[in-house]
Image: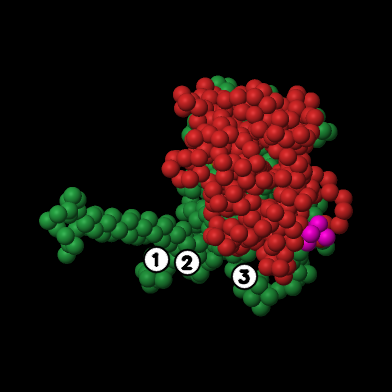
Amino acid sequence: MSFDPERSNFAPTLRSRRTWARIGRWLFIAATVVALAALMMMLYNVATSTVGLVAVEYEREPSTLVEQPLEEVSKEELVALLQANISAGLFRRLEHDQPFATRSRETVYDLVIEHVVAETIVRSWPLDKSLVDRAAIEAEIAADYPTARVRFHAWLQPQFLTRSMSSNPEQAGVRTALLGSLWMVLITMLLAFPIGVGSAIYLEEYASDTLLNSILQSNINNLAGIPSIIYGMLGLAIFVRTLEPYTSGAAFGVLDGNGRTILSASLTMALLILPIIIVSAQEAIRAVPQSIRLASYGLGATRWQTTWYQVLPVAMPGILTGTILAMSRAIGETAPLIVVGASTFIVSDPTGPFSKFTVLPIQIYQWTSRPQAEFRHLAATAIVVLLVLLLTLNATAVLVRQRLGRLP
Amino acid sequence: MLIENPLMEARQVTLYYGASEALRDVTLQAAPHQITALIGPSGCGKSTMLRCFNRMNDLIPHVRLSGQILYRTHDLYHPDIDPVEVRRKIGMVFQKPNPFPKSIYENVAWGARLNGYRGNMDELVERCLRQAALWDEVQDQLRKSALALSGGQQQRLCIARTIATEPEVILMDEPCSALDPIATLRIEDLMRELKERYTIIIVTHNMQQAARVSDYTAMMMLTDDRAAGTIIEFGETQRLFTTPSDRRTEDYITGRFG
Ligand SMILES: Nc1ncnc2c1ncn2[C@@H]1O[C@H](COP(=O)(O)OP(=O)(O)OP(=O)(O)O)[C@@H](O)[C@H]1O
Ligand SMILES: [Mg+2]
């Protein structure tokens, strides 16, 4: 239907415009569905590896040690069991590491499992297979390992967070890597956020239109696109090598250790995410209406007062959005930290900026590159931990942003 | 000289935005406790002229100004004068209401606090809102966002905010252009009250408004080569609107021009 087809100066395009709109809409819906499907696939893949059947063999059957199930035995009995079944030398060494009196029941239990029962996982399966093919799995194990027993094992369990690294997949956890990631993100953000926002303020509110400033600006834009491994090499050259006295803590009285510390990693990571923070903060500051600035100056505010009290509060939600993105990037980056020298195997918790460290993505990377299938389950579980950590930090930042976004 | 003791005075002001001339040889006086209106066709430099009086033009890059802007005996563009101090003494109300995205209370209090106000802030906020004829409407919702107010209320809030820094001069750039006739009349009433305490310079496109509220009127127009704005006639409003001496003024105020 058209209102006056004959006399119009306009071609009747409405029908084709409508068609294009429909096509566009379906394309967008299809794209969203594909993206969601890919995401679901990934989550399924990860989640199905975090729990499942395992076949275990024991050196000593737990039932031959004590009457009741081993899980219910008290700490004192466990210590006695340990003493009775391991060499005196090993027992003394364990006592020397940490007296049994001060150890928790949990750790003693782990020692019994490790040294007495000596449970080893000989084969493992993901959850989907475990549920569908249980009979086939048991037949397979009966043929290959007559003495082995098949049981369910949750790779993702609370102890996974509290145990440190171990070459035994059943004893291994992400505690060291998780703490390393937290330390690194904390220090990175403490460095990058103020510097980044400060630079954005300078570039938007103070810098005049000089050649130098526009060169600076275009350089910052380009820095955001440099491969992260280059930052790793930069970090290695500057922070690990040249500034070693400072990044190793030697200048502050920390004596053991080299420049491959959390501080070096954080400095490198801060450099890496600075351009992201600067550019997004600039966008946010630029989006603040000029009328607010004029109103502020009109009342006799200085440039600094205008920026601090009027521009920044309005820009803060936008700045935080960019910061959240940058933080996610910092948590997930792997390559530059490998170059900067994250440790491949450490069991001691990081205690501060001058500690040796590893982080979750590196831990995951290492586990995936091990030949044994069990470590792949650990990697999947660590991915879940990483995702949860990411979501938690982002949710916190979003909450902060919402609080700031609200009016006084 | 038309005015014996002007509070503010522009002397032979010429202003360039980069290479383009916006004002040429403008001379204007504002009498204390009077309302001076700037009228003229769009683009003739009224806003530019107004911004000279509180150095808001400093915020625009590549602006050059020659001539003098005098406030009492001070030359406002003298190197010893701090523009921040100037803007407190000479407040400004903009064409579009631009309250801060904060509470009503904070909108009024901020400018005062910023300039080191030491008195009782609650009293100041109430007094300024009363002077701006807004108190009765907002007294129960001082903590509410200023952005939730209507356009006319926002403009009165902006006036209250300007008064709170205790300026001596208030510059108003088309303060009623976004308002309906009722809100416009309220602001005009307000201006008549405010002139007891303050000196007001107002830019307006509304001839009746200029005739109703102002005591002096300056007619601005582009120069004959259409390059820059200048003042073609200045005088008491009464006289200028009844017996304009310049033909172009007469055409403009009777609506035959521009
Ligand atoms: N920030 C600026 N940069 C460059 N030129 C400007 C700027 N502001 C104004 N001008 C120029 O100066 C001249 C006068 O502008 P101004 O805004 O003072 O006019 P006006 O009389 O206030 O017009 P209106 O009545 O439409 O508000 C115009 O030619 C305009 O293009
Ligand atoms: Mg104007």
Label 3 neighbour load within 10 Å: few <14, some 14-19, many 20+: some
Where residue A97 appears, x then y in whole percent? 78, 51
**Callout 1 crowding tier (Cα within 10 Å): few <14, some 14–19, many ≥20:** some
Residue B79 visible in this rendered orientation of the protein:
yes
Which residue appears farthest toward the right when viewing the image?
Answer: B119
Chain coloured green in the rendered structure: A
State the residue in front, A386 or B242.
B242
Q: Amino acid at mark 3?
A: Pro
Sequence-wise first label, 3 or 2: 2
Per the rendering, the mark at residue A53 is 2
Please name the amino acid that badge 1 sits on: Lys
| Tag 2: amino acid | Leu
> In the rendering, what colour is chain B?
red
Helix, strand or loop status at disc 1: helix
Residue at 54 percent across and 30 percent down: it is: B229
Q: Residue at x 87, y 50 (%)?
A: B118
B30 to the left or right of A375:
right
State the image coordinates of residue A67 (x, y, percent, origin top left).
66, 78
Contact between marks 2 and 1 (CB within 8 A): the answer is yes
